[in-house]
């Protein structure tokens, strides 16, 4: 019975952590962070404010090259942070992009695993303006 209780507590704790760091339907790994930050540009209101605060809190982990995360996932986080219109996230993204640019530019497609998607995501991270919310796009007030 004690072991069963331990399993129940672990599941509950895991669910709470996922719900806390899962905003707009995405986990807070670098890919989910990037997607959430990217979507933030279309949101307004209390939910957007709470999501923004969560992103700033999660940025320390999501925008870190020390995590062993594949480069293309970090580029997704960089793209989202650059599109978020949150100055702190944009600054962190710029620093990480500068740090990753040298190694990315010195390798060729085919040099390692994920090299093709790394190059595509790197290019998008360098100039993500095509992914920006347009002035005439509606904002969702949540």
Image: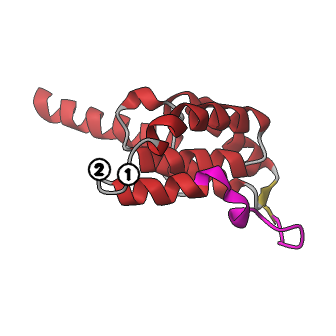
| Residue drawn where x is 60% and y is 34% of the image | 98
Q: Which residues are magenta?
A: 125-139
Q: Secondary structure at mark 2?
A: loop
Tell me if residue 67 comes above or below residue 141 in the rendering: above
Report the residue marked by disc 1. Answer: 108
Observer-nearest residue: 126 or 19?
126
Report the residue marked by disc 2. Answer: 111
| Residue drawn where x is 20% and y is 30% of the image | 6
Q: Is residue 100 left or right of residue 84?
A: left
Q: Secondary structure at mark 1?
A: loop
Locate residue 46, reporting x and y percent: 79, 48
Locate residue 74, reporting x and y percent: 48, 43
Gap in angstroms between the C-alphas marked 1 and 2: 6 Å
Locate residue 96, reporting x and y percent: 57, 33
Q: Is residue 45 visible?
A: yes
Locate residue 21, reporting x and y percent: 51, 41
Quadrant in the picture for residue 131: bottom right
| Residue drawn where x is 59% and y is 58% of the image | 124
Q: Is residue 9 left or right of residue 35?
A: left
- The answer to whether marks 1 and 2 mark residues whose Cβ atoms lie closer than 8 Å is yes
């Amino acid at each position: 019975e004690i072991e069963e209780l331990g399993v129940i507590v672990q599941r509950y704790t895991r669910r709470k952590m996922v719900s806390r760091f899962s905003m707009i339907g995405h986990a807070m790994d670098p890919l989910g962070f990037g997607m959430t930050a990217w979507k933030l540009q279309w949101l307004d209101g209390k939910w957007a404010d709470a999501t923004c605060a969560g992103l700033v809190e999660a940025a320390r982990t999501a925008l870190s090259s020390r995590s062993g995360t594949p480069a293309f996932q970090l580029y997704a986080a960089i793209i989202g942070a650059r599109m978020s219109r949150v100055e702190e996230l944009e600054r962190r993204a710029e620093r990480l992009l500068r740090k990753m640019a040298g190694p990315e530019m010195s390798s060729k497609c085919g040099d390692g695993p994920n090299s093709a998607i790394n190059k595509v995501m790197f290019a998008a991270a360098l100039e993500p303006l095509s992914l920006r919310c347009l002035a005439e796009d509606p904002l969702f007030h949540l």
